[in-house]
Image (spheres, helix red, strand yellow):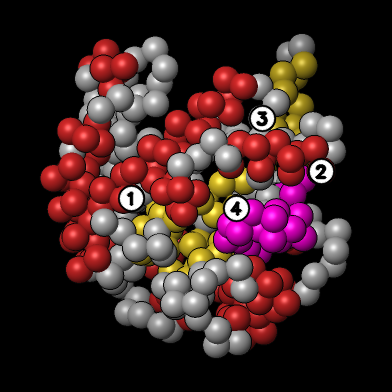
Amino acid sequence: MRLGFAVKIIGEGGLPTGDARRWQSGPHLRVSLAMLDDALDYLERHDIRMYRFSASIAPYATHPDLPQFHDQVEECREELAAFGERSRAADVRLSSHPGQYIVLNSETQSTRDGAVRDLELQAAMMDAMGLGPEAVVVLHVGGTAGGIEASFDRFERGLELLSPAARARLVIENDDRSFALGHVLELCRRTGLRAVWDVHHHHCVDPDDIPDHEALGLAMATWPAGVVPKMHFSSPKTQMEEVRKKVGRRVEKSWALPPLRAHADLIDPIAFDLFLRETVRGREVDVMLEAKGKDLALLRLRSQLGRAPDALPAAAASD
């Protein structure tokens, strides 16, 4: 089983993982790839074999009003191929996860067109890297306007706008508000897409009351033979936060309780160990950890489970 984390590297003082400059400064995919090359060094040093790179590593590449950024993939063919070759040699599984504004089933044509441009870009970068079918672009189903069935129809119409290459990379994930695993599985049945099961989201929204062990099996069954499925795991935030509000000359204090869907900084090692024993039960699946602590959360979890040396990067020394 691979354990992975998303985007930001906190350990060893932190590493940039994408060119985040504003368009006036001329940011470029080439700069992001140089940063990701350093990130790959970090992953290898700590024996981390799964990583989600930012969906924004090619800045402004799909912005309709900034055509000067649209050719970044073509301009970086050699760098993309080299990075992909190195990631394969390091046995690092890569993926991306476009943000909340990438909505393929949007009622708004401009939003849907923007989603298509972004998904095509993600697929083009992965193809230029020479990555296999295990490298995927994770997407939520989207909005629920008009009801579930209408949402499905819009998603299928949006999917028809994608090239075969982009469709081949696309996988869909259950969310924590609207589209439960049962909905995602039905959409997978209609479209042939693969499902990424998010455990935390499943515990937030599961009207079908699907047991975890069964849920994992159903999601894994949407993946073809020979390709290891991936899934998401996180722990709910439990820390209260003090809220201070000034009322006249006084400061009133109260406590805000975290919502169930909020992610914790770290992964609960007891819950994860139980997950391995009771849900995974030896099945082959890779797990993306979605914790605020990013790489440090992964390294701490491995240490607590006794599956790796307990040495952590310098940034975690005071933890």
Badge 3 or badge 4: first in the primary sequence: 3
The label on residue 172 is 4
* Location of residue 242 with respect to 311 vertically, above or below: above
Badge 4 or badge 1: first in the primary sequence: 1
Which residue is located at x 27 percent, y 41 percent? 16
Badge 1 or badge 3: first in the primary sequence: 3
The secondary structure type at the circle numbered 1 is: helix
The answer to the question of whether label 3 and label 4 lie on touching residues, with beta carbons closer than 8 A, is no
Residue located beneath label 2 in the image: 148
Which residue is located at x 31 percent, y 55 percent? 11
* Location of residue 228 with respect to 248 vertically, above or below: below
Disc 2 and disc 4: Cα gap in Å? 15 Å
What are the residue bounds of the magenta stretch?
Answer: 176-201
Which residue is located at x 55 percent, y 65 percent? 231
The secondary structure type at the circle numbered 4 is: strand
The answer to whether residue 160 is magenta is no
The answer to the question of whether label 2 and label 4 lie on touching residues, with beta carbons closer than 8 A, is no
Q: Residue 229's x, y, as percent?
A: 51, 70
Residue located beneath label 3 in the image: 106
Q: Quadrant of residue 51?
A: bottom left
Residue located beneath label 1 in the image: 126
The secondary structure type at the circle numbered 3 is: loop
Total numbered labels = 4
Q: Residue 185's x, y, as percent?
A: 71, 61
Disc 4 and disc 1: Cα gap in Å? 17 Å
- Amino acid type at circle 3 is Ser
The secondary structure type at the circle numbered 2 is: helix
Badge 2 or badge 4: first in the primary sequence: 2
- Category of crowding for the residue at label 1, using alpha-carbon neighbours closer than 10 angstroms: few (below 14), some (14–19), many (at least 20): many
